[in-house]
Image (cartoon, coloured by chain):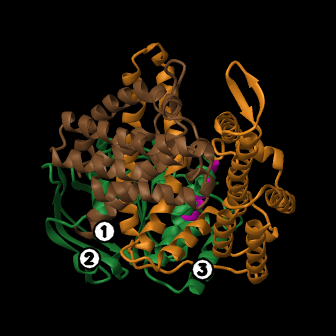
Amino acid sequence: MNSSKQLRMTVYTSLFVAFIAIGAFIAIPVGPVPIVLQNMFVLLAAIILGPVWGLSCVAIYLLIGLAGLPVFAGGTSGIGKLFGPTGGYLLGYLPAVFVTAGISKGLGKKMSSDVIAMLIGSLIIYAAGVPWLKVVTSMTYEKALAVGMYPFLIGDALKIIAAAFIAKTLRPVIKL
Amino acid sequence: MQESIIDINAICHTFSDGYIGIKNISVSISKGEFIILAGKNGSGKTTLLRHLNGLLLPDSGIIFVNGQDVSKHLIQTRKTVGMVFQDADTQIVGDTVFDEVAFGLENLKVKRAKINEKVTLILENLNLLHLKDRSPSTLSGGEKRKLAIAGILVMDPEVIMFDEPFSNLDYPGTLQVLSTIIKLNRSGHTIIIATHDVETIICEATRIIIMEKGLIKEDGEPDRIVKYLESYGVKEPCSSKFGLGLQPWLT
Amino acid sequence: MAHVTPFTYRQGQSLLHLLDVRCKFFIICIVSMSLLSAHLPACFFYFLMLLFFFKKSGLNIFATLNSIKYFILLLFFVFIARALTVKGDIIFSFYGISITGQGLNEGFLVAFKFFLVMLTGLLFSTTTQPSSVKSAVQWFLKPIPFVPEKRVAVMISLSLSFMPVILKQAKEISDAQKARCADLQKNPVKKIIRLVLPLLKKTFLSADSLVLAMESRCYSDDRTDPEFLPSGKEIPFLIGSFIISLSLVWL
């Protein structure tokens, strides 16, 4: 990879770090639970940046949150948040972004493969987040699922459809 | 005639999508000149500027900066020829004013003590020192543009190029930037300004180059060129229209 | 992003502000770890100490608590969940739901510990400039192989300076759409696309010009190292925090 291309990926990846961070603040009012866009930006980072840059994107996001810059939901940061009740979702972004990017790349960056990749990615986020929530709060699994997953599923489906459209239009614009 | 600093020999550039950027341009620029590069949007001004510090390389032809071939001495060229971009917001790298100015020197691996000394001096000269710990995004438009200039100036360039330096600025901001540019020229810097709105600076310029469709159409002293501006889609300054000649915008 | 994140860095000259950022990092790590195995009296003791430091750094504890109200709500939820599920001596029973003494105790302790770790982090981020956080991250990443710590530091700077720009543009885009009655659009997928797509397009284009600006300022991964300015109080602070950590664990 030549240095100019590498610099471009560096800047694009930083841009997605910023998007994931502010994704926690951008909410679209739909029904009783507003749709927060953070996990959509994680999935978008995966299918647009690819596995390596996507993974470094999420890693840097978590790193600056861990280091005390207020980039987690609600303007919070630090170990307390990362290992707190909802920390599993944040840590789940790491495997999710890698797997999503891998599948999307492997299946050839079509809209249908993007949707499949993002579906699996979302499931990975919940697979990390829900058990974590259960352990920290010592709830039963039924309860943890009822608070930590079911209410968000419809929103997630909508976000995945939107993200697939966005990725399709964006790819030719940014010419990676 | 003064010693020339930039020599452009018959350069052409066609973009990868087939769009022709500039065609067969030859121009020589002397030390200390104050040049306005005028023309409509899409006339090739920005493309030409980007060649002067090696952001784009010509398909044919050759550019010399201080006698050195640009394509073979990129870092040296970029130190000699600084470029201030159109949108100040998108060229800011650092998260404080101080770090933003230090960025270029950090790239050149200058020693930290030297960086601190130089950055402080530049910020003081441009009257930005009191803002050094602020986040650049909180500055006013004029301050941001001055910050962008500081980030270039710290690398001791001989030529400073501006791409539309007055776009999106309010009146005080325009005044700040204008007086900074004039001061830079008086202290010996060669200035090149690409713009489609010449009114603010025409009185300070020593030379106007008009571009259209990737070609240089006119090149000469402002007094002579000013009457041709409108035929190339650039507004003629009011004072000249009313027969008052060129009046300084800064009073 | 001053308006969205209520408790970012506050300027100041207190002891905690001046302490070397690497030292602060280290203290946070060991104190947070030892908090996890601490008992209730030690936690109260530590809480009082935190209050003292908040006061000393000139921060308003109530404004701080207000800024993490959702997190506190979440902790309250954790407390309730624990109180209901932990088995033990029942002190209150209502339609088959029973609250136990052990549950109350344990729930309170867990919630309180999270709260304290959170406050410690807050104290850190309000007294530490983002750019020195970045420098410290770079310093701590240095010994880790295969991690280009200097590039990571640049990426942190970039993303920090992108955030306010993106937020501003998001606001503009949504206002522009409201002005054209976009509120009437009920399809949520379309709502998302109409906000996010222009936002991404616009910021990616400005990212392209940022790449040019960085190139023209000679960007390189091999850069000057950041500097740290120790205040001279690091050793006593480190010793102090060791004592606190030990007493948290043993008390």
Q: Amino acid at mark 3?
A: Glu
Q: Can you give x and y, in whole percent of width and height, for residue B211 in the image?
A: 28, 53
Q: How many marks?
A: 3
Which image quarter: residue A162? top left
| C72 versus C43 height, above or below | above
Q: Can you give x and y, in whole percent of width and height, for residue C92 in the image?
A: 78, 28
Q: Amino acid at mark 2?
A: Val
Marking on residue C44: none
The CA span between labels 2 and 3 is: 34 Å
- Report which residue position mark 2 lands on: B70
Category of crowding for the residue at label 1, using alpha-carbon neighbours closer than 10 angstroms: few (below 14), some (14–19), many (at least 20): many
Rendered shade, chain C? orange
Which chain has been coloured brown in this picture? A
- Report which residue position mark 3 lands on: C227
**Looking at the image, is mark 1 or mark 3 nearer the viewer?**
3
The CA span between labels 1 and 3 is: 34 Å
Q: Main secondary structure of the magenta part?
A: helix
Q: Earlier in the sequence, mark 2 or mark 1?
A: 1
Quadrant of the snapshot with the C terminus of chain C: bottom right
- Report which residue position mark 1 lands on: B52
**Looking at the image, is mark 2 or mark 3 nearer the viewer?**
3
| Pointer 3 chain | C
Instruction: Determine whether the residue tagged by mark 3 lies in a helix, strand or loop.
Output: loop
The CA span between labels 2 and 1 is: 8 Å
**Quick one: B119 or C131, which is closer to the camera?**
C131
Q: Is residue B239 visible?
A: no
Disc 2 + disc 1, Cβ < 8 Å: yes
> What range is drawn magenta here?
B172-181
Instruction: Determine whether the residue tagged by mark 1 lies in a helix, strand or loop.
Output: helix
